[in-house]
Amino acid sequence: MIGPDATLLPEGPVPDGPTRASVPRAALSSWRRDHGSALRRRPALWIGLGLLIIATTLAIFGPFVWQHDPNAINILDNLQAPSLAHPMGTDEQGRDVFARVLSGARISLAVGGAVMVAGAVIGCLTGIISALSWGPVDFAFMRVMDSLLAFPPLILAMAVTIALGTGVLTASVGIVLTTIPWYARLVRADVLRIRSLPFYEASEALGASRRRLILRHITPHLSSTLLVQSASVFGYSILALAALGFVGLGAQIPTPEWGAMITDGLQSALTGQWWITVFPGIGLLVVVTGANVVADGLRDLLDPHADV
Amino acid sequence: MRIASFISARLAGALSAMVGASFVAFVVLRVAPGDPARLILGPLADRAAVNQLRHDLGLNGSIAGQYWHFLVNFCRGDWGYSYAQGASVSRLILDRLPATIELALFAFVGAFLSAVLLALLATYHRRRGIDLLVRVLSYVGLGVPQFWLGLVGLIVFFKAARVLPGPEGRLSASASPPPSHTGLYTVDALISGRWTTLGQALLHLLLPALTLGFPIFAFLVRLLRANLLDVRREPFVLVVRSKGIGRWATYVRHVLPNAFLPTLTASGLLLAQLIGGSVLVESVFDWPGLGQLVVGSIQRQDYSVVETFILISAFTYVVVTTLLDMLYGMIDPRVGSKRAT
Amino acid sequence: MSGRVSTLAQVDTVKADTALTVTDLCVDYETRDAVYRAVRDVTFTLRRGQKLGIVGESGCGKSTLALALLGLLEPPARITRGDVVLNGVSLLALGEGELDSIRGRDVALIFQDPMTSLDPVKRIGDQITEGIRRHQPELPRAQIRRRTIELLGEVEIPRPERRVEDYPHQFSGGMRQRALIAIALANNPSVIIADEPTTALDVTTQAQVLELIHRLASDHGAAVVLITHNLGIVAEFCDIVHAMYAGRIVESAPVHSLFRRQLHPYTEGLLAAIPRPEMRGNDLASIPGAPPSLAAIPTGCPFHPRCPVRQDICFRVVPPLEGVKSPDGLLTAECHFAADRYAEFSG
């Protein structure tokens, strides 16, 4: 969980194995980019998407199919190893871990999505406004972004959660705050680049209004950057929420958030009841890795600077 | 003098970031619900004591005044006092710093060396097997929750296989630390020739360092692998080979250095990872470092410690990234040169 | 007089003063989708001290050929047929290590883009020294350094003793190219392969660099294979010219002969496309169409889609190598009508 940007390589996509691209371009002068075949050649992207879709489906429909109440305490049944009745065992209070993992999926996915969207919207707006503004205003905005970026992301999120109180909502606000500068910087750079392109200058010269310029000309070109960055932010925010839950700043027990569940099962894990801690972690691993793989795949597919 | 303007620009940026960060930290923490003085003294203290503390902490002044007070104190090294833990914050932090530094050092060096080794192996031979392994490892490393990884490690190696020590910190309770020179148990043990202590310390470091370093390893190996693959396609590599230099020599002498440069700039992120990660990992292993201090302080609502930690993290991060930036500028002979054609 | 020949090697018997012999060389790119043949049955001989030019448009396989001659092809490219014999030794029979020993010592390469052909983070002097030390490790440091400075002087870099410490970005394009020449010459190779050495330079520098390569090669007794798309520089530089198209050598002739008469319509087109002052006011001549991609080589004669004088047979039958004995020497071309065209030129 290095940061919202960590899974994206600063450079473009990486070639792997001999492909048509290895043959000198001049020699294959009649070859055109074929998105269809590029998609077919990227099994990783499908795996990632598949994982996410499975997780989302389980999250949405799971609790309807699996009827156990994630918060139902049943002391007599506590610390049961995984079995047919409880596929993921029960925790210290006798709550069914599988039900809690399913509920946790809802929380993580929802927060991931919300943070991704909120961060994108706010960061994007900030970036656009900053790039299109008068010099000193732009400068000021970017200094504020720099100040936010001066903090290791987790630390900033922690600070916000301490200030605003614990809970999933405040944790989400803190995480959004850490993603805003990433978006803002990227979008600003993109807008500046677009602004210097001939077609934009032409539109300006023709007298297009600010609003039209932004909506019709800038936003479409931002989409690929935003898409790629958002996939990465999705994964990052889920891990960040879990981390905050782990240190006790995010979700609080009995809320079945995965990070909090891992803390909850800490003591039990070391006395042999590993299932309480392990399963939520697997959930995190699967969902976040899926998101990262998708981010990578999108980057390969959409990067306008790609050479392949 | 391009270099001079380059350096001063970087320094100015760093300074503004630090000032901005201090302001953010100040605002965020002062917004915290509750009366800081009350929080510090606890619910049983009487009102007079609370008011006295409010006065001492300057909480009765204006916001701007408080900020100024706050900043000045911080720069002077007066980081406040923790009533809950009965010591000055600076004392608490300095006491625990060596433990965190030792852990972070081992984690980073281990991650770095393995990343370089694996990236080289994965790209040099073009063998799909190792390459796939490296890519899978890096995905896992970037997607796994660190604290969970540590726990799984403990479950497997401590509980199940019983080969590694449990979450008991730097040494087992019965062992005594070596005479202190640097505060780093491994170094101190090495210096004073306490071989069993050295072994014990290393054994206790193994799992925590692995856990802390794994995401760093994952990030580095991916980056290096991509850079190596990019650089080796550049024309100058063929020119080197045309001189008769062998493949391995070309790789190590020419491709690797060029691949390192972009990695250097990205490494600033890794420090953020180390700082954030140590907060998580130390809790799992009961490692007596800064991270554990912070987590404990949060739980005890001992905000003077947390506040200082937040500021220090930000400052360290800014300083290190700026230094890295300047280092990159000095190492890469192309940066700052006006005559680049 | 005309005669049918199957390979040039049969006519030019291998003599002791032959530096390089290439016989029926084929280089394939083997990818997941298909196999692309970039170099097809290329055959030529290079004598000691001779300057040979290989001319063709981008994509005709010249650069692949250059790499093949040095044994520097990387997967998915591979030599699938034929042989390269350098100073009597077959390169295909050698292992990696042995090839490494030969490169830089017996054969050297001058690359095309000086901006990207030097390691950006190493000093110019070190990059030259590396080559010397590789093949003459027994030499003392001071001597190697002296030799490096000497080389920089030979390639006409002013103040070589100072410039030796510079990094590539401190050199202009022309100077970088000279440094590359110095690297190539460092160990006195018998064969120098120059792949478009002047393409990235401005015209004035082009002339200087070419003259430099020519002079130094002659001084050191090295043979040169000059690969280029620019017929103009071939005239100044080479003794013999081979024209390459779609991976094949479609015409070979001594340079003066080629400029007087072209047996292959492609070469004729290339020459016609060179702008001349007499053409002022008229459109520039060019060969219509574009070179074929490796994935779609035409049947029969690969040039037929663009050939102004194609006949029915050109669509169907691959032209054999036709040879013509002329006062200037043996001329060869892969065209069904080579002999007739020769007659036209002479008659």
Image (cartoon, coloured by chain):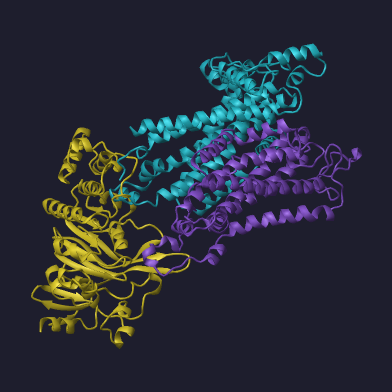
Chain corresponding to purple in the figure: A
Question: Picture coordinates of residue B164 (x, y %)?
Answer: 66, 31
Q: Nearer the viewer, residue B189 or A60?
A: A60
Q: Quadrant of residue C55?
A: bottom left
Residue B196 visible, this orientation: no
Chain B rendering hue: cyan
Residue B215 visible, this orientation: yes
Q: Quadrant of residue A78?
A: top right
**Residue at left 61%, top 42%?**
A180
Q: Nearer the viewer, residue C86 or B294?
A: B294
Query: Taking A129 as reference, is A166 above or below it?
Result: above
Query: Taking C320 as reference, is A199 above or below it?
Result: above
Query: Taking A289 as reference, is C35 above or below it?
Result: below
Question: Picture coordinates of residue B204 (x, y %)?
Answer: 63, 27
Q: Nearer the viewer, residue C159 or C82?
A: C159
Left or right side of C273 for C49: left
Query: Taking C29 as reference, is A72 above or below it?
Result: above
Chain C rendering hue: yellow
